[in-house]
Every structure is written in structure tokens, then in C-alpha cells.
């Protein structure tokens, strides 16, 4: 399971590449080949190029930090990605980019992406929506 937090929870004294590599190094998954090259490939896949990969986390925008958080979550080859309000701190355009990354993970890489959001618009992009009402005993399922 990979986790993407609303507040990113990246290690601030590390750069983007190091944040991804540290996750890879503590997971049970063993990568073929060079770990650094694989981490750079993962970062590139979420829109973080080589020059941004070596920047300290605090030198990246919120959207870039969230992409690093997503890269870290998928770097262990997790089959399930849990995302807690992953667009909550982002502007509309950046939110759309993050949602497109999650859709690509689900539809093309066959990951199970479970996301919590208060946004009806973001929820509307999902394949399946579970909506919790104020009465926690009732919930609504939409989709297949």
C-alpha cells in the first residue's frame, strides 16, 4: 500500500529524488537495475524532470511536492494507493493534473486508487464513489 497525504509529508531536508529513493530502500520490493535510475523514471512519469528531482522539497511548488508524494507512493510498486485529500491544498489546474495521474495509475497501470475528497468535482472523476452521509450508518454507492 502506498499513501499520499494531503500535506505531502515529504522529508524536508532531502530532495525529491532522495524522498523517492528512501521509500524504495525500506520497502520489501526489489527493483531490477539501478535504484536511482528507476526513481528518476518514476519522478519523470509524474512530471518531475531531472532538474527538479535534485531540488530541495521546499524549492518545489505545492503541485510538484504532491507529484513527489505520488512518486514516493508508487515507488514501492504498491498495488493500492490511498490518497487523503490529495488536491486539498492545490489550485484547480494543478488538481486536474493530479487527478489525471491517478486515473492513469488506475486505468493503465492497474493500481487500485482510493481517494478521500470533499470535492464533488474530484469525486465525479472517479469510477466508483462511496459517499458518507452525516448518519455514518448510511452510505451511497455510485458506479460499477
Image (cartoon, grey):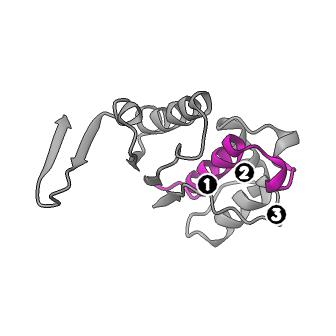
Q: Main secondary structure of the magenta part?
A: helix
Q: Judging from the image, what secondary structure is the residue with disc 3 in?
A: loop
Q: Measure how far apart labels 3 and 1 are at the Cα level.
A: 16 Å
Where does label 1 land, which residue? 75
- Say which of 112 and 41 sits in front: 112
Q: Is 61 inside the magenta-drawn segment?
A: yes
Q: Measure how far apart labels 1 and 2 are at the Cα level.
A: 7 Å
State the residue lying farthest toward the front. 134
Relative image position of residue 107 (x, y in whole percent): 41, 32
Q: Give the mark nearer the N terminus: 1 vs 2.
A: 2
Q: Measure how far apart labels 3 and 2 are at the Cα level.
A: 14 Å
Question: In the picture, residue 122 is in which quadrant?
Answer: top left
Relative image position of residue 134 (x, y in whole percent): 20, 55
Q: Which residues are magenta?
A: 53-79
Where does label 3 land, which residue? 14
The residue depicted at 85 percent of the width and 55 percent of the height is 56
Tell me, yes or no, whether the two marked residues, 1 and 2, touch with CB atoms within 8 Å. yes
Residue count near mark 1 (Cα–Cα under 10 Å), binned few <14, some 14–19, many ≥20: many
Q: Is residue 46 above or below residue 135?
A: above
Question: In the picture, residue 80 is in which quadrant?
Answer: bottom left
Q: Is 112 inside the magenta-drawn segment?
A: no
Where does label 2 land, which residue? 39
Relative image position of residue 1 (x, y in whole percent): 45, 61
Q: Quadrant of the C terminus?
A: top left
Residue count near mark 3 (Cα–Cα under 10 Å), binned few <14, some 14–19, many ≥20: some
Amino acid at each position: 500500500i502506498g499513501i499520499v497525504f494531503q500535506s505531502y509529508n515529504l522529508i524536508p531536508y532531502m530532495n525529491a529524488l532522495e524522498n523517492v529513493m528512501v521509500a524504495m530502500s525500506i520497502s520489501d520490493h526489489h527493483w531490477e537495475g539501478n535504484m536511482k535510475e528507476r526513481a528518476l523514471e518514476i519522478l519523470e512519469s509524474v512530471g518531475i524532470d531531472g532538474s527538479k528531482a535534485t531540488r530541495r522539497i521546499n524549492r518545489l511548488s505545492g503541485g510538484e511536492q504532491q507529484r513527489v508524494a505520488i512518486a514516493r507512493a508508487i515507488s514501492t510498486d504498491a498495488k493500492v494507493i490511498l490518497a487523503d485529500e490529495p488536491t486539498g491544498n492545490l489550485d484547480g489546474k494543478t488538481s486536474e493534473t493530479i487527478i489525471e495521474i491517478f486515473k492513469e495509475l488506475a486505468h493503465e497501470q492497474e493500481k487500485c486508487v482510493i481517494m478521500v475528497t470533499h470535492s464533488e468535482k474530484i469525486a465525479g472523476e472517479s469510477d466508483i464513489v462511496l459517499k458518507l452521509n452525516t448518519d455514518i450508518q448510511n452510505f451511497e454507492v455510485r458506479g460499477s
